[in-house]
Amino acid sequence: MNISSNTLYSTSTNYQTSLKPRVEEAEEEKSVEKKSAEEKKPQNELSADEKRLVLDLQSRDAEVRAHEAAHQSGGAATGGASYTYQKGPDGRMYAIGGEVSISYKSGSTPQETIANADAVIAAALAPANPSGQDLAVASSANMMKIKAQQQLAQETQEKLTGKETYKNEADKNSDSKEEKGEGESKRLDIPA
């Protein structure tokens, strides 16, 4: 198969990559949450600007988490979501960016590659508002799909051309035999 692309794409709203193992990330999140619980200010101690900022951070956190969850439910081989946090004036940590890795390989057949590319496209475009990176991943998967479709069309054409060539050769052989009188056998009835 001519198509070979083993690719790992990251659909991200902030384009950051974390190289920490997932266990370390989970432990870090727990310690951050524990510290933030100790440092929380009650809502009534926040100024109007701080309250507005907290509402903005809460909204962004919900948007980021929904965006990354949509990628994960998109159908391709997706990894876990990782987030970038910002501490709010209330002492809590809010997700302000995130990413989900989407990986796919070309298949062993053009049909398999097309199916894999369709799954990646679905995962990349799953959020209501895909980011620029999401669109780039979908575009790359679409190019891979187009190449696989071209290869499939070429293979189909070669099969058809091969059959046509064989059929044409058979017809030529049949025509030449008929010209020589070898084509059909006719029964002659000779009276006895």
Image (cartoon, rainbow, N blue to C red):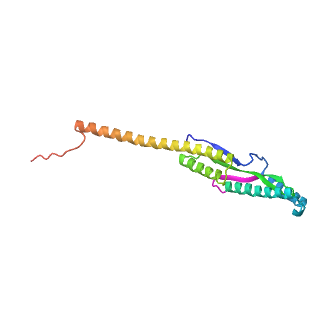
Q: Residue at x 38, y 41 (%)?
A: 164
> Where residue 46 sits in the image (x, y, percent)?
88, 59
The prevailing secondary structure element of the residues shown in magenta is: strand
Foreground residue among 155 and 80: 80
Q: Is residue 182 magenta?
A: no
> Where residue 155 sits in the image (x, y, percent)?
48, 42
- Horizontally, residue 9 falls left or right of residue 52, namely left
Q: Residue at x 89, y 63 (%)?
A: 44
> Where residue 41 sits in the image (x, y, percent)?
89, 60
The answer to which image quadrant residue 56 occupies is bottom right
The answer to which image quadrant residue 175 occupies is top left
Which quadrant would the N terminus be assigned to in this image? Answer: top right
> Where residue 60 sits in the image (x, y, percent)?
76, 55
Foreground residue among 119 and 160: 119
- Considering every residue shown, the one lying at the far front of the view is 48
Q: With respect to residue 33, does 137 lie above or below?
A: above
- Horizontally, residue 85 falls left or right of residue 71, namely right
Q: Is residue 78 magenta?
A: yes
Which region of the structure is painted magenta? 73-83
The answer to whether residue 26 is seen in the rendering is no
